[in-house]
Image: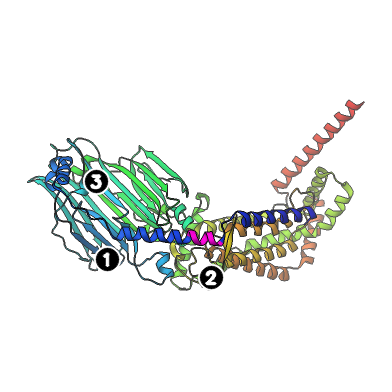
Amino acid sequence: MEKNQITGFVLIAAMLIGWSYFFSPSPEELKKQEVQAKAAEVAKAKAAKTPVIQAITPQDTNVAKASAGDFASNVTGTAKDIVLENKDIKVTFNTQGGRVKQVLLKNYKSYKDFDANQNSPLVIFDENTDKISIELPTLKGNVDISKLYFNTNATSGSVSEGKTQKVTFTLQLADNQTVEQTYSLADKGFLVDYDLKLSGLDGILKNEAVKFNWLENVRQTEKDLNENRKAATVNYLLADGDNFDQLAENPSSAEELTLEQPLKWISFKKKYFLSGFIAKNTPIQKAQIYSTANVNDSLNIKTLRANASLPLADLKSNKGQFQFYFGPNDYNLIKDVAPAFGKNVKLSYDIFLPITRYVFVPLFTFLEKIFSNYGLLIFILVLIIKFALLPLTYKSYISMAKMRLLQPEIAKIKEKVGDDAAKLQQEQMKLYNEVGVSPLSGCVPMLATMPVLMAVFMLFPNIINLRQKSFLWANDLSTYDSIMTLPFTIPAYGSHVSLFCLLMTISQLVYGYYNNLNTPDQVGQPIDMKKMAYITPVIFMFVMNSFPAGLSFYYFISNLVTIAQQIGIRKFVDEDKIKAVLEDNRKKIASGGGPKKSRFSEYIQKQLQSAEEAKKAIDEDKKKKKK
């Protein structure tokens, strides 16, 4: 590297370190902030576990009855819990509102409990922070039935294997006037069927949509709070076609959207978990969806909300059939739940989606059945992918070797034409055509491997498979590993040191070195790619420091395997034979035979000739003006 470049990088590094030293909080301030945050979290947890009980006065009851209108007789009653559970999920219902009160995922736990080696199930929905309510449009005003008391004959219990258990809540006004809510749970899985039926209420209800209101305060379930907050958003699918979309994954502000088109489903996506409301028959009419980041709250880090309209006619005609999904955002589990429901897992960009969906996901699932150690699984995954791409790697090496063997002739051309870049490029293309070499022949095979790299880059941070899977010093491969916590924060890097990220960076630098040995010098190019091979890994070290340890480990192993392939290919390839092939091509092309020119080479040569002619015309015009 040139002296000015080295000086520039040293100054940038000094500025970053200086900024961190002078403007970052001191260790004492950080400790004070941590104590305050923990105290606030404990206070909120206590408040959530100890609900405030207030005496209900006759005046309160009278106000409630007045607001309930025709449903006044259902304002008072006894709240009773009904618990249904299967092998995966535990759902608590309550007779007040006939509503979902709490949902626990029995085989998952938060990172906090995982790190403390506690076996508490993960809470995905809880009435203390979350709410689902139904508003009926009566002639006397909207009535929130979640505040009314329902009757049920159901009892708590576990669902037997091969069976489905139901809980029916009934709100009775008169003999033929009822509101009926039925929940069904199978013996396994995370789906809860929900049927809402309105009978004999024509003289009570207005001809308007029923309001379905849903609010969840997202709790921190993962190690990285910022990533946990950012990933939480509202997804939806329009009923017309496969029109999946979402609110922006904004980690620091509010997002909202009004959807006037019918919807098939709405979901609240967290980092690795998902709550969904799905219409089985007639679509949801319309909805307003909201996402609000709670930046100063470390307990309820984001608030997600949806206010939807359900078609009244369907609820009257026994077509009000829906489903709730409370469970992991696992592609293999959710892909068949509803149309396009698998898109809640951000597998990849659309352009790379086929590679991820049809190669990586099935391969990963297959390897999980064989290997319980996920570090070993990733290692085997790298080997399979790398050896599948070996023909492209070999072809790229051969092409680069041909270009490297032509370097002495290119150096003579440069000495001949001097600093005339256009002339130099034109002569280079002429040389390539003489020996039957395409300048793209070395790039195309390597570019063909880029979709694989990009697919992995998107896949690993979003699949739940690596969650809470340990390997070596990393206790959770789905988040960053940390071998050291810095007393300050480095901009764009963070306050921790990821060892897998460092190993990835070192391996990338070593790979850059070996790759440069096989790469010809670039004459007349504005960017020296050989130098970039050492600069880019350092940039990616900053980017990848907070990425999942599993991803850094994948790239680390991938780089090592690539280096081994480069060394092996270099020993296997006889460059004297390549030189003989080039000379043979030169003779054949000179005699009118040999390999045909590629269209790209012909195009480049024509463009260079045109540029040369244009330059000559400009020079001649300048000479005429001087005369």
Q: Amino acid at mark 3?
A: Ile
Q: What amino acid is labelled 1 in the image?
A: Asn
Q: Secondary structure at mark 3?
A: strand
Q: Which residue is mark 3?
A: 134
Q: Which mark is residue 540?
A: none
Instruction: Quickly name the residue at label 1.
Output: 86
Compare residues 291 and 154 and report the one nearer the observer.
291
What is the distance, in whole Å, between disc 2 and disc 3 at their CAs? 51 Å
Place of residue 249 in the rendered image (x, y in percent of width and height, measured from the top left): 46, 49
Category of crowding for the residue at label 1, using alpha-carbon neighbours closer than 10 angstroms: few (below 14), some (14–19), many (at least 20): many
- Chain-order first, disc 2 or disc 3: 3
Separation (CA) of disc 1 from disc 3: 26 Å
- Residue 370 in view of the camera: yes
The label shown at residue 380 is 2
Q: Residue 378 location in percent, x, y?
A: 52, 68
Q: Residue at x 81, y 45 (%)?
A: 421
* Residue 442 in view in this figure: no
Left or right of 290? Residue 618 is right
Label 2, secondary structure: give it: helix
